[in-house]
Image: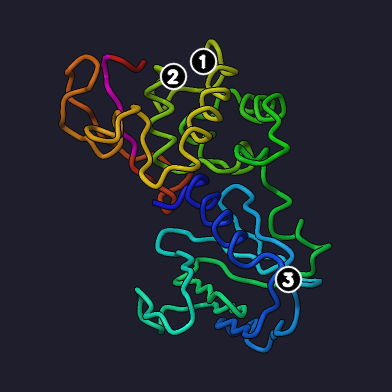
Amino acid sequence: MPEGDTVYRTATNLNAALAGGELVRCDIRVPAFATVDLTGDTVEGVVSRGKHLLIRVGEYSIHSHLKMEGSWHLYRHGTKWRRPEWQARAILATAEWVAVGFQLGTLDVVARDDEASVVGYLGPDLLGPGWNADEALLRLTATPARAVGLALLDQRVMAGLGNVYRNELCFLGGVLPTRPVGEIEKPARLVALAHRLIDANKNRVDRTTTGSLRGETDWVYRRKGRPCLRCATRIEHGELGESALQLRDIYWCPRCQS
């Protein structure tokens, strides 16, 4: 599941392959930007902002968000693609590499000096060079009555957390996802834990929150009905969201979390 660590690795890999190269092909396959052609321009770099990705080419930035199904692949010229061409939303090629964005949830092109129009609303980037824990804490605690499980998914609070981390952080913090933020004794600890956990996974292909890569990699996520790895109590499952259209799965241990 694409979360901030997945997008960070994607940006790192794309940057290593494309940065400094001149585009020999630019094919944006969404109607609003189908006429955009940056062929001949140089890729200045690729960066992640939370779960967003920015490919900076000349005076423009190609902005994408993977959502649930999207991914960026790198291929050598002439190599067979691992996904069908009809799923391609963007094809960017240099003399050495072909980068293909498949089933991207969001794809648009903005001027470099207008990147704030697509990522300016984000909170502190958990994997960014400007990570600010104090600002994240202020945003997390700004609405005390809000359920912590909702606040952790809000990209305006901290950018980069998805549903896996939301559930795992609540377990590690010993709080139910439905617990109001204002009732958490040490919210700063939860912020620090979020940064430490996602930072530890940013260079791993296989994510783990338990520290194990050979056994159970998650404490509660998708473990409904299975015994808690700490106390053996059965993991429970429910849904939580700001509205019926935004409901996401939550998992918790009724003994370890309160």
Crowding at mark 2 (Cα within 10 Å: few <14, some 14-19, many 20+)? many
Q: How far apart are marks 3 and 1 (CA)?
A: 44 Å
Residue at figure coordinates x 40%, y 80% from the top left: 79
Residue reaching furthest top? 185
Disc 1 element: loop
Quarter where residue 145 is shown: top right
| Position in image of residue 62 (x %, y %) | 66, 69
Residue nearest the viewer, comparing 90 with 179: 90
Disc 2 element: helix
Q: Earlier in the sequence, mark 2 or mark 1?
A: 2
Residue with the mark numbered 2: 173
Kindly check if marks 2 and 1 are in contact, taking CB atoms under 8 A apart as contact.
Answer: yes
| Position in image of residue 244 (x %, y %) | 40, 50
Verify whether residue 103 appears in magenta.
no
Q: Where is 207 relative to 38, above or below?
A: above
Residue with the mark numbered 3: 57
Quadrant that contains the C terminus: top left
Residue at figure coordinates x 23%, y 30% from the top left: 236
Q: How far apart are marks 2 and 1 (CA)?
A: 9 Å
Q: Earlier in the sequence, mark 3 or mark 2?
A: 3
**Amino acid type, callout 1:** Ile
Image position of 32 (left or right of 147): right
Q: How far apart are marks 3 and 2 (CA)?
A: 41 Å
Kindly check if marks 3 and 2 are in contact, taking CB atoms under 8 A apart as contact.
Answer: no
Disc 3 element: strand
Task: Please provide the residue range marked out in magenta.
Answer: 250-255
**Amino acid type, callout 2:** Gly
**Amino acid type, callout 3:** Val
Quarter where residue 139 is shown: top right
Q: Earlier in the sequence, mark 3 or mark 1?
A: 3
Which dot, 3 or 2, sits closer to the camera?
3
Residue with the mark numbered 1: 184
